[in-house]
Image (tube, rainbow, N blue to C red):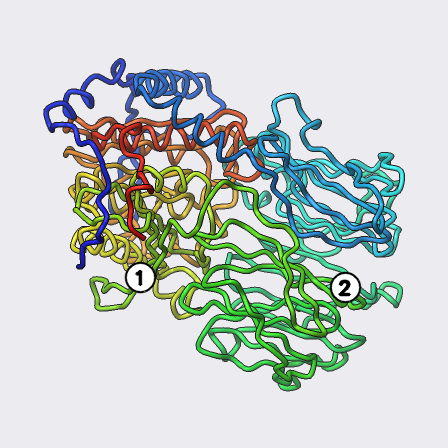
Amino acid sequence: MRAFPICVSILMMSMAAQAQKQSIYAGKYPQTKRADQVDEYFGTKVQDPYRWLEDDRAEDTKNWVAEQNKVTNAYLSQIPYRNDIKADLKALWNYEKYSAPFKEGEYTYFYKNNGLQNQSVLYRQKGDGNQEVFLDPNKFSPDGTTSLQGLSFTKDGSLAAYQISEGGSDWRKVIVIDAKTGQKKDDTLRDVKFSGLSWFNNDGFYYCSYDKPKGSQLSEKTQIHKLFYHKLGTPQSADKLIFGGEGTPRRYLSGAVTDDQNFLVISAANATYGNELYIQDLTKKDAPIVPIVTGFDYEQDIAYVEKSTLYIVTNQGAPNRTLVKVDVKNPGKENWKTVIPETKFPLSISTCGKKVFAHYIEDAVTKIYQYSLDGKKEKEIELPGLGSAGGFGGKDEEMETYYSYTSYVFPPTIFKYDIKTGKSSLYKASGVKFNPKEFESKQVFYTSKDGEKIPMIITYKKGMMLTGKNPVLLYGYGGFNVSLTPSFSVSNLVFMQHGGVYAVANLRGGGEYGDNWHNAGTKMQKQNVFDDFIAAAEYLIKEKYTSKDYLAIAGGSNGGLLVGACLTQRPDLYKVCFPAVGVLDMLRYNKFTAGAGWAYDYGTAEDSKEMFDYLYKYSPVHNVKETSYPATMVTTGDHDDRVVPAHSFKFAAALQKGQSGRNPVMIRVETKAGHGAGKPTDMIIAEQADKWSFLFWNMGLDYNKTKVDMSKTKG
């Protein structure tokens, strides 16, 4: 590997000083009691001594969390540059941020954050008139932890319904307002979960929810999603059940009215992969709900409707997806006609101005093409570089649309696109104080354990010499068909300005190469994902980007499982680990909140002895042993009702007991926070400051002496 010509001045502490710093964290770990809980799976007895931590409402659990946070806060408070990192993050974060605009009725709406506002504010303007505040979520709660999490307008834009989340919870409240006056209607709904809001004319809207359980434990009843119709002016108790419930039990539902208000489209699923499609003719009173696709072997979504023609994105016979069209009167698969054929890269669709925009992920970066409704390719949209673009949506009558573009070295920027000419123009540039010319972002392909080639994008300051002592943060996810495409991060910028290298591996289990790539990281092939991540770490060490003493790994949710599995399988390979809001108990994950729907990716311990054995072999909670573990900071939120905090509680308790080395094992439990969405800005900055403080401190690096001096570089 060639050495870059510019040296980075990084002061290294002696190993003795580093060991001394690691050994003086404040206090001892709280005493965690162990219960005599044993479960049996196919003849195998499994101990679960921390089962009591699953009840996050119990006083014992609350006291344990408080004591853990006390130790963690004491540890972090000793780090001399913790406040400096926070100040640097705050300074960089403090710039105006905009969303792409969208039109509803007579107004154009957009989100704006002045810089450090806890929540972005929704503005609107009519024509070239003055901008006015439409909704300010910062006024929803004194501490900024109540956020706006969904908004839907009637076709004429005169009414709106919006969802709010309190403390990051997935359970939402729906509020209806007169969009012209801002006056609230007497139609507030409560306990709505995993739902869009779709208006039918100006009379009411469709939404989904579950029966709310008393705790996080699931019952059969609380796993059934229901699609309701709420008629304005009536109580929520009178809302009509449209689909779901005991008659058609499904775990996940969505209902959307087509733009012409003629049809209700229903998607029904029992897992995060595979769905049915149904349609109801709303022009006829009490029309039946008619199936278009039944069974859960494939995925399909209606992307657009033109009169009686349905445009469907499907993976039936096309793992990377294709766009087909069919008449609603004869929707059987035998009548489907291909509009955009499958290619070697995954396809998704948006529409505007009666045009189809085909979004592809090519080796984890975005390519977008404009098509006519009959499938004629008209042009490729020229993007600023190799990154991620999103948007290109709008109504049929609009002849211009907007999109955002970003990469690891390109801050989020909004462009206006003229559909007729195919030309893009800058709409809103980013105000972040950042010069992309000072950074380099490149894609490499490395070899995993079984020979599979895995893409990874590595970003760092230009001219940095690869000495094997550069601090590296390796990030991954690898699940649920989710693609990690390039995106800009102020937090990562602070890290890279101080000599850090940020690497993102596109692991199997994700969606970067379609269904085959996804399936290669599911169920009894899940170990491929961990092997891919471990191989990424080994590549970074081999190519002198870093060494074991300066390598950190991070991931959240399914990525938290990734980090948990990799640190228990290869504790020798990393210096610092950050498992965030992770799925860490693989034998019981399906017992809580949304967990039962993840079985397509994971399988469950009840499926078969083979599936149990496989899960038991890698489940992070069950594979902690007495050994020397990396410095680890587990993070979760006390309001996380998607991946319940019990996963993190049990894992942290097990790691603290198993740690035989000198490295700290901490858990940081954020209060009034959920799985991640809607966190206020000050909470995010505090979290990121603690993360980087923990990383630099445990690598023995002085944050204030690691900043790269670009005036001394050559390129």
Read off the residue under disc 1.
Answer: 525
Asked whether, in this view, residue 81 is left or right of residue 254, the answer is: left
Mark 1 lies on a secondary structure that is helix
Q: Which mark is residue 395?
A: 2
Answer yes or no: is residue 115 visible.
yes
Identify which residue is drawn at 77% across, 60% down: 257
Count the labels in the image.
2
Q: Position of residue 606 (x, y in %)?
A: 38, 51
Identify which residue is drawn at 37% across, 34% down: 648
Identify which residue is drawn at 20% across, 29% down: 700
Q: Quadrant of the N terminus?
A: bottom left
Circle 2 Cα neighbour tier, 10 Å, few/some/many (<14 / 14–19 / ≥20): some
Q: CA distance from mark 1 to mark 2?
A: 42 Å
**Where is residue 634, by image quadrant?**
top left
In front: 431, or 269?
431
Q: Looking at the image, which residue sits at the far left? A: 16
* Disc with the residue nearer the chain's start (1 vs 2): 2
Q: Position of residue 611 (x, y in %)?
A: 32, 56
Relative height, residue 289 to residue 435 (above, below): below
